Amino acid sequence: MIFWNSDLASKISCTPGEMAALPGYISKILDIADSLTNAAPGTWLEKAKMIEDPFLRYGLSLVGEGFAGDTLEEICAILLYVSNERGYGFLAQCVAAEATLGIANGDDRDTLLRKLLPYCGIDKALAALAEGVSTHAD
Amino acid sequence: MLIERLSRLYMEFGVPAPLHDQKRDSSEYLGNVRKFIVSIMDSGDNRQNLFTHSQQSRRKPVKLAYLLLAGESDRKSIHEAFERSGLVSHGQKQNRAEHLMWLAGTEALARGIHPYLAFLIMTAWFGSETAEKEYQWLSRQAQERETALDEYIVPGELTDMLEEAAGDPAALAQAIRIAGMPLSASALAGCPRYYLDSIFEIIGPLGSEMLRELIVSARQKLTSDEIETAQQAFAEVFSRQQSELAERNASGEMPGAETEFADELTVDADLVRTITDIVLLAEAKVLKNTLSSMSDVEIAAILRCMEAIAHERLLSLISTGRQKRVLSVIQDSAVPSPAESLRNAQYFVQKLLASYAPKTLKPGETLGISEEVRSLISSVLRRE
């Protein structure tokens, strides 16, 4: 059960205009996930270092160290809790954290997309899923 | 669930007050955290050292953290102690974020989490930018430590699997993440140095050093039977990861493969259903024996006679190298006709029956085969 909190709700809320940028960001994350999982042995961290987004870069570096599961989730939750970002910036960090956990868990592209799409809002997510997640991702 | 965890933090601790908003320089806080983790690592199981550190510390939350860990307090007692001391109560405004960080780190260590991870949990309270810098510092520390490992071998299936895994490092890295460091270390504790060195190359320096330390600890604490049990559990996780990745690669390499299977299903849906049921119901050991007596072409042929749900089971019973060969045969071969499919299916169930029959079966003795599988096999053999 999620105990919703008004402070968290206000921190995460953003305008429909800002939300429109989220599918593009998700698509970029999926490409990063593909490139990391197909990386040559031992090159994960090198590739992760090149990620521009600092939140995602740090999360995926920890995945490259072999960390996953509950502890990684705890670290991501704390990073989000203390984040100074608000609105779209914070929402994007939530998506990055969710993606980090999914990649650590070995999720394939479709599963990852199903986890990230709800951050775009339920209507967009349902529409995209009805269209077929794979086509949407492409 | 991430968002649930985040909501709980808000519910429990209210609006966060970032550490760097406070009057003191954040490097002072970071210095305390670094010193704390190093002394925890150096103290090992020596509780007396922790008492000494507690007496020497000037800051109240640091003192309390050492004291609680020295007393081997559990998670609940740690939380209560921080609450009762007033350090993390809602009325406490000054340095509350710092106190919450110490509470989180102490709790993590009390849960048995490795000090490196406890450090990462604590530094997360400083925000992602500082946390990343501190992770790099810790990485350098880990590289400098590099725990030495002696050769220690507990014979088991895992060593053979690791030899095979050299060609599939992604599945191995994923298996380590899914199994978790403690189980991975317990399983790898009995593997030859040569394989361990190749594993350390596929994960980062921090993860490698943590794995090394946990391997040393597992060798000291576990019996060879316990290591063998861990090996079996890890081997299972690794096989699952291998087959998942192979399936994913196969679907990526073979666009239209699903359609081909779907077309075939319309040819003889009942046969496909029956073979699927047989594969799902038959014992893994018997199926494995059956597959080992079949060629790659024969396995590829039978894979075309079953629903996708059974593919994973069948593929998980063969090595990764063989999976790739089988999938490449499927890619290069034409879709069989219904008659060919039936012949392939009958050949497979005959092989399966042969695997069920022990070499020493006496006349009048029945096969150790369930009634359900027996009737499914009969129904395939009766077909014309």
Image (cartoon, coloured by chain):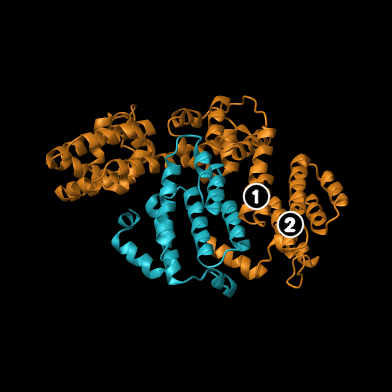
Chain colours: A cyan, B orange
The Cα–Cα distance between marks 2 and 1, rounded to whole angstroms, is 12 Å
Tell which of B381 and B66 is nearer to you: B66
**Residue occupying image coordinates x 30% and y 59%:** A132
Spot occupied by residue B217 in the image (x, y as percentages of width and height): 67, 36
Spot occupied by residue B230 in the image (x, y as percentages of width and height): 55, 38
Spot occupied by residue A119 in the image (x, y as percentages of width and height): 45, 64
- When the figure is inspected, residue B172 is found, relative to residue B21, above or below; the finding is above
- When the figure is inspected, residue A80 is found, relative to residue B150, above or below; the finding is below
The three-letter amino acid code for the residue at tag 1 is Leu
Q: From the image, tell me which residue sits under label 1.
A: B120
The three-letter amino acid code for the residue at tag 2 is Trp
Spot occupied by residue B196 in the image (x, y as percentages of width and height): 56, 30
Disc 1 packing (10 Å; few <14; some 14–19; many ≥20): many
Q: Earlier in the sequence, mark 2 or mark 1?
A: 2
Tell which of B41 and B293 is nearer to you: B41
**Residue occupying image coordinates x 21% and y 39%:** B345
Q: From the image, tell me which residue sits under label 2.
A: B102
